[in-house]
Image (spheres, rainbow, N blue to C red):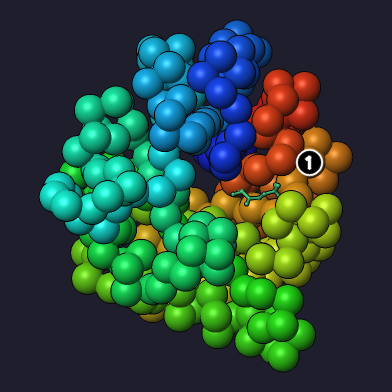
């Protein structure tokens, strides 16, 4: 079996006490899990959750970070502050960052390079809107976001990058891309990676799928040749919905 990477993005949910309860349950219930795991709580819960997952098989992730290392950036959180809390992975370019908070490829690219410089793993999210899909642009959008997001990232640095395909129309909507549709975009993104970094890197890269992943569709998605994991939102908020996804297969 491949080394699947199952990540929970908790978005703007949970107080520290609620985060601690979820993290504690996951540590206990996933300790015999076979895959690579990550939880990404809110900034405010990182320290609490970090202490709970330390030494377990669950990595600590942040949902975003500033494009600058330090300085006068009111309301931002820096890579140094994340490292200080034991964060190992950062999610960048999430569709909510792109579409609600208007982050563009250049900004996301700056964050990707800064995170890698500080030795964080990166989950770079790409994905098309419904309008882009319906006008036949899904592949092109994912290609552009991948290429621009990785601009200036060397082949050695790329080893720290996971790509998450998250079609915007499938996020939080209950609409999942069919395993076939998702796999075809994943295959396309893999080709883009091959052009940028070569065939070996394309084979090795982990490409997660995100968008209404649930216990009842996870196994079908993961069975596809090009789907190497999941980035889970809503279903990551409770042990009873996340653990069955995390333990699929
Ligand atoms: P949902 O699983 O709630 O659709 O969210 C997906 C997502 O955005 C994960 O980052």
Secondary structure, mark 1, is loop
Which of the image's four quarters has the N terminus? top right
| Residue lying at 57% horizontally and 52% vertically, measured from the top left | 208
Front residue of this view, candidates 72 and 229: 72
Compared to residue 249, the image places residue 98 above or below, namely below
| Quarter of the rendering containing residue 25 | top right
The single residue placed furthest to the left in the displayed view is 71
Which of the image's four quarters has the C terminus? top right
Compared to residue 139, the image places residue 61 above or below, namely above
| Quarter of the rendering containing residue 86 | top left
| Side of 160 where 123 appears, left or right | right
Compared to residue 34, the image places residue 227 above or below, namely below
| Side of 91 where 212 appears, left or right | right
- List x then y, in percent, for residue 30: 61, 17
Q: Determine which residue is flagged by label 1.
A: 214
| Residue lying at 42% horizontally and 68% vertically, measured from the top left | 103
Q: Is residue 23 visible?
A: no
- List x then y, in percent, for residue 212: 75, 50
- List x then y, in percent, for residue 198: 35, 70
- List x then y, in percent, for residue 53: 45, 16
Q: Is mark 1 within 8 Å of ligand 1?
A: yes
| Residue lying at 33% horizontally and 47% vertically, measured from the top left | 75
| Residue lying at 83% horizontally and 53% vertically, measured from the top left | 174
| Side of 86 where 27 appears, left or right | right
| Quarter of the rendering containing residue 62 | top left
């Amino acid at each position: 079996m491949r080394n699947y990477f199952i990540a929970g993005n908790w978005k703007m949910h949970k107080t520290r006490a609620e985060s601690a309860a979820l993290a504690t349950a996951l540590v206990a219930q996933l300790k015999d899990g076979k895959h690579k795991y990550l939880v990404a709580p809110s900034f405010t819960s990182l320290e609490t959750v970090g202490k709970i997952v330390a030494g377990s098989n669950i990595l600590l992730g942040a949902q975003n970070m500033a494009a600058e290392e330090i300085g006068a950036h009111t309301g931002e959180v820096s890579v140094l502050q994340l490292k200080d809390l034991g964060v190992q992975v950062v999610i960048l370019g999430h569709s909510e960052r792109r579409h609600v908070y208007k982050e563009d490829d250049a900004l996301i690219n700056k964050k990707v390079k800064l995170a890698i410089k500080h030795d964080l793993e990166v989950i770079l999210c790409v994905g098309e809107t419904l309008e882009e899909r319906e006008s036949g642009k899904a592949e092109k959008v994912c290609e552009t976001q991948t290429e621009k997001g990785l601009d200036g990232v060397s082949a050695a640095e790329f080893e720290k990058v996971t790509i998450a395909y998250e079609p915007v129309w499938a996020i939080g909507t209950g609409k999942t891309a069919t395993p076939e549709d998702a796999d075809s975009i994943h295959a396309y993104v893999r080709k883009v990676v091959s052009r940028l970094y070569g065939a070996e890197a394309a084979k090795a890269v982990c490409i997660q799928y995100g968008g209404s992943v649930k216990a009842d569709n996870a196994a079908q998605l993961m069975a596809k040749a090009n789907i190497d994991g999941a980035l889970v939102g809503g279903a990551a908020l409770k042990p009873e919905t996340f653990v069955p996804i995390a333990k699929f297969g």
